[in-house]
Image: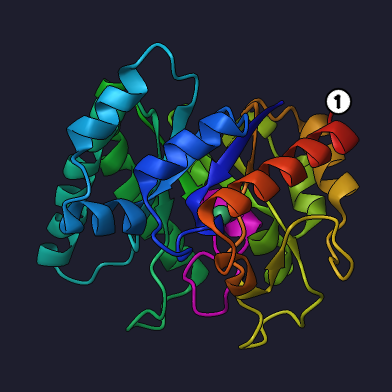
Amino acid sequence: MKTGFNEGCNRFCKNHSVMEDLELCEKYGFDYIDIQSECLERDLAEGKYTVDDLAAWFADPNHKLKMLSYNALVFFNMKQTQEEKDAVMARLDRIIGICNKLQCKMIVVVPSMDLPVHATIDEIREDAVAVLRDMVKKAEPHGIRLSLEFCGAPGMSINRFEDAYAIVQEVDSSMVGITLDQYHFHAMASSFDNLEKADGKKIFVWHLNGMENMPCGAAYNTDEKRLWPGLPGDCLDHKRYADTLKKIGFEGGVCTMEVFRPEYYALSNEENIRTAAEYTKTHVEKYWN
Ligand code: ZN
């Protein structure tokens, strides 16, 4: 099992920079990085470097770190006007251009939240299937896969594993799968019964984290309650996640740390990435090897 770092862990650390993350992830032995779109856009707007500079970094044969995913194309579904739908596709075109330069073969897509219409699960599924089919037509020629990340918050339009899985099954493309984020899975009470019945090959990305034991659907049960996995107070059953992924044949090959805890943003970038690397390695050794 390879290890990955998601910039959710350190995106608000002082003087955060994607370029520095590449160096630090390489230094602390991560195999992969998920680049957060908001970090990349912030750095590009500030003129810290260009996409071509990042491309040169990844192309350097001395660097082993690879980019696992562009994280993320957010709010892709349930658009109400043609103009909004076109804007999503235009964003996808731009992201594909970035991924091609950075040798990245995966785009995580995140559902829309707080919908202006009272859509049913069936309506949301039909819409998402249609949009993902259009998106895959653009991404597939570049060998880029799409990974739908259901988000465990009440306002999210796709917020449980079983709903995301039904969408991916209906799209029925080898290029479209699911991001299984442990926090998101637990936060809206997705069911292990359904995960155990799923085809592990449809899970492209695994986001590792722990979390405080918060009520399902509580307004304060947010990404900020995530923890480095295994800390006191972490309520997640890590053995069950790992064993289930093994049992259903997960082939993603990477365990990616993703927390969004404000306390961890007080660490330096280096301390944050060094700590994330330690926890990820310990986790993989304990539950996977
Ligand atoms: Zn995630």
Residue at image position (89%, 37%) is 286
Residue at image position (21%, 55%) is 88
Where is residue 162 drawn, in percent x and y? 64, 56
- The residue beneath circle 1 is 289
Quick check: can you spot residue 285?
yes
Quarter assignment of residue 43: bottom left
Residue at image position (77%, 59%) is 191
Give the amino acid at mark 1: Asn
Above or below residue 259? Residue 165 is above
Residue 109 falls inside the magenta stretch: no
Give the quadrant of the C terminus.
Answer: top right
Give the quadrant of the N terminus.
Answer: top right
Magenta segment boundaries in residue numbering: 149-167
Query: Of residues 34 and 149, which is closer to you in this image?
Result: 34
Q: Quadrant of ligand 1?
A: bottom right
- The residue most toward the top is 61
Query: Of residues 155 and 221, which is closer to you in this image?
Result: 221
Quick check: can you spot residue 173?
no
From the viewer's perspective, tell me whether residue 275 is left or right of residue 97: right
Residue at image position (19%, 58%) is 46
Query: Of residues 117 and 50, which is closer to you in this image?
Result: 50
Quarter assignment of residue 94: top left
